[in-house]
Image (cartoon, rainbow, N blue to C red):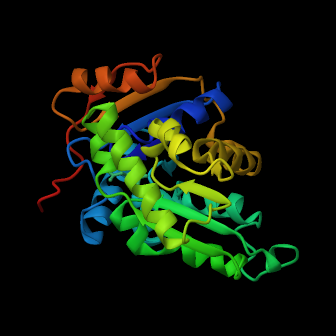
Amino acid sequence: MIGVFDSGLGGLTVLRALVERFPSASFTYLGDHANVPYGNRSSVEIVELTRAATVALFERGARLVVLGCNTATAVAARQLQQAWLPGTEWKARGHNVLGIVAPTVEAATQTPWSVTTPQYPQKNLTDIIAVFGTLRTVNAGVYPEEIRKRTPKVTVVQQICSELAGAIENEVSDAELDRLVSEGIAGVLAQTNGTAPHRAILGCTHFPIVEHLFRRHLPPATRLLSQPEIVADSLEDYLQRHPHYVSGNDGTLELLTTADDAAVISKRARVFWQDAPAFQRVIQTSDSSS
Ligand code: DGL
């Protein structure tokens, strides 16, 4: 079984693409609604919450966990993969954690993750890439850092959309969502002096839920990169090389939440994914106040 984790409902955008791509694989999704949003939390908290969620998914039988959350990936993935997991019994049993920044950077730069020095033709690419993310994702700086390693002449413009993920979770009005998205895009265009970015990364898995609003306000020339599809492409490649993570799977799908009232979360989720099964409550994986 593959575990997919997000702070809340945003990771459903990734999960849905994965379920469609791998119908016979089994997935367990965990939304940490008790602690959402993560985007404005401290790095220490995000690492701890992400680690706790990963352990919760491992304990439920996931051998592979996909962090379907840019904030968790940007802040915690490296730490989990390099400092925490290697010292655990999980690693010895072949478990692994994957983030979603790497496949997104690969798609944005058309360069494999393993290639960290610029190559032709990417070497001379002078495009503008916009990245929309939470405060913590933007401050972590991983998108510009990793994009520039591969395409040094590309201009990366980052825009913090600190209220958008929370607004999506809390089902604020369409007018308010529209305002927050248009504000974010105005922030990007102010940085580019009005030049349309060539590509835009919605660097928060909540944001595809309002992709139509990004499309409405971005200049028509800007190409939106679809992170759920990018992650599905990348996982397909990974599972071809590591098929044991899905061997014996029977296509089951389970949605878990740390919220007190799973029924409320299920209702909200259906707004974004009509056919999603009901969420079940799990005991909170970690106390954010600790
Ligand atoms: N959906 C998440 C992301 O991709 C987190 C949003 C949040 O909890 O602030 O960044």
Q: Is 155 drawn above or below residue 90 in the view shown?
A: below
The answer to whether residue 22 is visible is: no
User: Foreground residue, 145 or 77?
Assistant: 145
Q: In which quarter of the image is residue 111?
A: bottom right
Q: Where is residue 221 in the image (x, y as percent from the top left)?
A: 69, 52
User: Foreground residue, 95 or 139?
Assistant: 139
Q: Is 151 drawn above or below residue 209 in the view shown?
A: below
Left/right placement of residue 38 relative to residue 118 reads left
Q: Which residue is drawn at 65% across and 69% down?
A: 128
User: Foreground residue, 175 or 100?
Assistant: 175
The answer to whether residue 215 is visible is: yes
Q: In which quarter of the image is residue 124?
A: bottom right
Q: Which residue is drawn at 36% across and 57% down?
A: 161
Q: Where is residue 133 in the image (x, y as percent from the top left)?
A: 43, 59
The total number of labels drawn is 0
Q: Residue at x 53, y 70 (%)?
A: 157
Q: Is 12 drawn above or below residue 188 in the view shown?
A: above
Left/right placement of residue 26 relative to residue 242 reads left
Q: Quadrant of residue 104?
A: bottom right
Residue pushed farthest left? 289
Q: Which image quarter is the C terminus in?
A: bottom left
Residue pushed farthest top? 275
Q: Position of residue 143 (x, y in %)?
A: 54, 69
Q: Residue at x 34, y 32 (%)?
A: 174
